[in-house]
Image (spheres, helix red, strand yellow):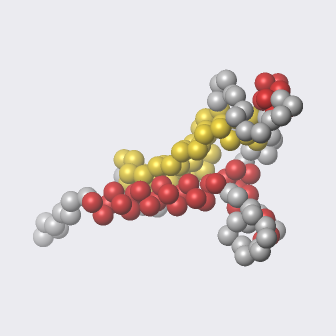
């Protein structure tokens, strides 16, 4: 079943990258929904709409992040948001060469963007000399 909060993490000795999911309390679908079916499914709980945030922390301090709002999924398969890019079928991965097929997974790009921001932050940070 669907879970909110931190749903994925990758940690090293000093760094933590995490994905936090927050369900939208009053979801309003803003995509193509000519007959209103998607909004009806959001209203009756057949679909869930959530916001996602990837955060990079260094020693517990946020140094990079990326956010995506209004993702809509079946609550039973919402984990595909952060797992589908590792699909066992290589043709379903956006990192695979597959001419003529556009597979879009937002999660890997969110991680890349948060890491890019973290690297930029670290490049600007003052350097300290070792006290020897």
In the rendered image, the quadrant that contains the C terminus is bottom left
Do we see residue 45 in this rendering? Answer: no
Quadrant housing residue 34? top right
Q: Is residue 38 above or below residue 7?
A: above
Quadrant housing residue 33? top right
Residue shown at 70% from the left, 50% from the top = 81
Question: Could you say where residue 123 lies in the image, as x and y percent from the top left?
Answer: 30, 64
Question: Could you say where residue 10 lies in the image, as x and y percent from the top left?
Answer: 54, 57
Question: Could you say where residue 127 lies in the image, as x and y percent from the top left?
Answer: 20, 63
Q: Is residue 76 above or below residue 36?
A: below
User: 83 or 42, which is in the foreground?
Assistant: 42
- Count of numbered labels shown in the rendering: 0
In the rendered image, the quadrant that contains the N terminus is top right
Outermost residue toward the front? 34
Left or right, 52 with reference to 12: right
Residue shown at 36% from the left, 60% from the top = 120
Left or right, 58 with reference to 108: left
User: 58 or 132, which is in the foreground?
Assistant: 58
Residue shown at 79% from the left, 70% from the top = 100
Q: Is residue 121 above or below residue 50?
A: below
Quadrant housing residue 2? top right
């Amino acid at each position: 079943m669907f879970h909110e909060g931190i749903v994925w993490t990758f940690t090293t000795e000093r760094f933590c990258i995490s994905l936090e999911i927050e369900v939208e309390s009053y979801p309003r679908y803003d995509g193509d929904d000519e007959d209103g079916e998607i909004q009806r499914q959001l209203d009756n709980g057949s679909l869930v709409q959530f916001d996602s945030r990837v955060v990079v922390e260094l020693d517990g301090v946020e140094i990079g992040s990326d956010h995506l709002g209004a993702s809509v999924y079946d609550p039973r398969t919402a984990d595909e948001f952060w797992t589908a890019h590792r699909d066992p079928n290589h043709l379903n991965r956006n990192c695979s060469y597959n001419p003529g097929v556009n597979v879009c997974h937002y999660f890997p790009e969110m991680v890349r963007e948060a890491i890019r921001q973290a690297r930029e932050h670290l490049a600007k940070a003052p350097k300290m000399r070792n006290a020897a």
